Amino acid sequence: MKKRHRLMFPLAAVTLALGTWGYHAGWLASTFSPSPTAAQIVDEMEAAAGRAHPGFRRNHAKGLCITGRFDGSGQAVEISSAQVLQRGSVPVLGRLSAAGGDPAQADAHGMIRSMALSLTGADGQTWYTAMNSVPVFPVNTPEGLYEQLRASMPEYGGSGPDPQKMNAFKQAHPEIQPFEAWLADHPASSGFDNTAFYSVNAFRMTNARGQVRFVRWSMVPETAYTPMTAAEGSDPDFLAFGFAHRVAQSPARWHLMITLAEPGDPTTDATLRWPEEQRRQIDAGVLVIDRQQPQIDGACRDIDFNPLELPAGIEPSDDPLLLAREAAYAESHKRRVAEQAGH
């Protein structure tokens, strides 16, 4: 059983990658040579998942919609002029999901969890943020992502990738080691409500005086982490049922912790983590989720949660993966909307 999980891991890593990153079809072609287009990446994503499921997201296909509010502490105004980070409450619409391209998969197969949020300030500007339960990314270039996808395609007649192809990929991309080490040391949690979520990439925040700081952020749960139990692992839908039970009793709460980079911290390589325990962190406020809805007809269904839709005061860094984020989101969104419309 342990060997089977090890063979399935790379496919989960790919679903993390594709559930989080996308890019304009022409951007890669103009920046790298040779490079895949967004359509080619989404094609490979569908192949890695076995097949596409019409009308559903191409990654993190199984999930639920969430609504609530963000109660800003006002402490982040020293580094960002974004209205959503000022003191006060703003409405939140979001989605919780697990890695995988099958909307009917068992929850235990989605080792990597995702939180996508839309926060809208009083000024009408919206902050979309897409976070994952692993603080680092498996690769640090769009080309590496494409190569990982191709190595993760299911072996003919099997349920996982070809071990030889995956081993060759790992040898060619040693930057994947921190990602693998994190998964080995952090078993999947027992629920969404006790999972921490990370921005993975670095961003720029600019305050009202024009001062710029590089940051990463995380959503840290108030509920203590506990690992997934054997009973939960045998329940194919324990994540959604568990979260529904939780919010029926009391809201789920996370603290938005913004970590400030120090000189020398990498801001263009998402495979390298900053030592958070040695970096200043700002508690920017509390995310409060008090309602959940099925994704099939919930308010989050048609939102692509493009993580580069940012309000004034928050900007992307020069991480090459960030420039690649928009279009696979857009390409996947275009395909599933067309499928929903019957085209």
Image (cartoon, rainbow, N blue to C red):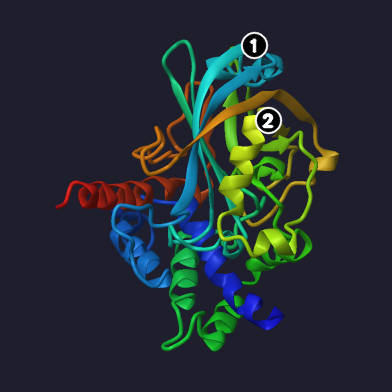
Q: CA distance from mark 1 to mark 2?
A: 27 Å
User: Height in image: 141 above or below 258?
Assistant: below
* Mark identifier at residue 257: none
Q: Residue at x 64, y 57 (%)?
A: 271
Q: Which residue is pictured at 67% across the width and 20% down the height?
A: 76
Q: Residue 199 lies in what quarter of the image?
A: top right
Who is closer to the viewer here, 94 or 229?
Answer: 229
Query: Does residue 180 appear left or right of residue 25 in this picture?
Result: right
Query: Which residue is painted at 65% across and 17% down in the image?
Result: 72
The part of the image, by quadrant, that contains residue 83 is top right
Label pair 1/2, CB-CB below 8 angstroms: no
Amino acid identity at mark 1: Arg
Mark 1 element type: loop
- Split into 4 quadrants, where in the image is the N terminus? bottom right
The residue closer to the viewer here, 85 or 210, is 85
Residue drawn at x 40%, y 36% is 298
Residue under numbered circle 1: 87
Image spot of residue 322 (x, y percent): 48, 46
N-terminal of the two: label 1 or label 2? 1
The residue at which mark 2 appears reads as 249
Three-letter code for the amino acid on which mark 2 is drawn: Gln
Residue at the extreme right: 278
Q: Position of residue 329 (x, y in %)?
A: 37, 48
Instruction: Judge whether residue 268 can be spotted in this image.
Output: no
Q: Position of residue 239 (x, y in %)?
A: 60, 50
The residue nearer to you, when weighing 279 against 285, is: 285
- The kind of secondary structure element at disc 2 is helix
Is residue 275 shown left or right of residue 28?
right
Could you tell me residue 206's position as x and y percent? 58, 22
